[in-house]
Amino acid sequence: MLTIAPELHAKIVAHARADHPDEACGVIAGPAGSDSPQRFIPMLNAERSPTFYRFDSMEQFRVWREMDDRDEEPVVIYHSHTVTEAYPSRTDISYASEPAAHYVVVSTRDPEQAEFRSFRIVDGVVTEEEVRIAAGVAGPVPE
């Protein structure tokens, strides 16, 4: 199960809506081994595409190095789908390289209601998990 603070949930949805009609992407870092999403890190979609996302390689290197320096890991890796349901595509599955991460997909196809779902992706196998938005869980860590 993904347990996430309301502020972090809202930030992911807001980023997805702001980048629409292109896909948005980013990470929520947390202390290594904690499974606790805390630090929101919006990233640029290097593809600038409504149907595909890819982290900019230099930005990804910088972000992952910063997480390593802070003893953090990517607890949530998120991106949006702009015209399809919130479910990992074949490309999303093939690029999933963090087996401990929660892969969140937000669909912005309905302008009134964002669809927010979380998955575990390990060795190409996709398993949907429950999302619990809970006040009082660890929120964003101040910079």
Image (cartoon, helix red, strand yellow):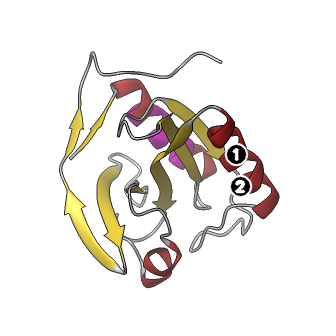
Query: Quick one: label 2, few (<14), some, or many (20+) residues within 10 Å?
Result: some
Residue where numbered disc 2 is placed = 60
The answer to whether residue 46 is above or below residue 113 is below
* Horizontal and vertical percent position of residue 87: 33, 69
- Helix, strand or loop at label 1? It is helix
Magenta-drawn segment: 9-17
Q: Is residue 89 left or right of residue 23?
A: left
Taking the image as drawn, is residue 66 in sight? yes
Using the image, tell me which numbered label, if any, was put on residue 63.
Answer: 1
Name the residue: 74% across, 64% down: 46
Task: Check contact, mark 1 vs mark 2: CB within 8 A.
Answer: yes
- Helix, strand or loop at label 2? It is helix
* Horizontal and vertical percent position of residue 129: 20, 56
Residues 16 and 95: in front is 95
Query: Quick one: label 1, few (<14), some, or many (20+) residues within 10 Å?
Result: some
Q: Is residue 74 left or right of residue 58?
A: left
- The CA distance from mark 1 to mark 2 is 5 Å
The answer to whether residue 25 is above or below residue 53 is above
Residue type highlighted by circle 2: Gln
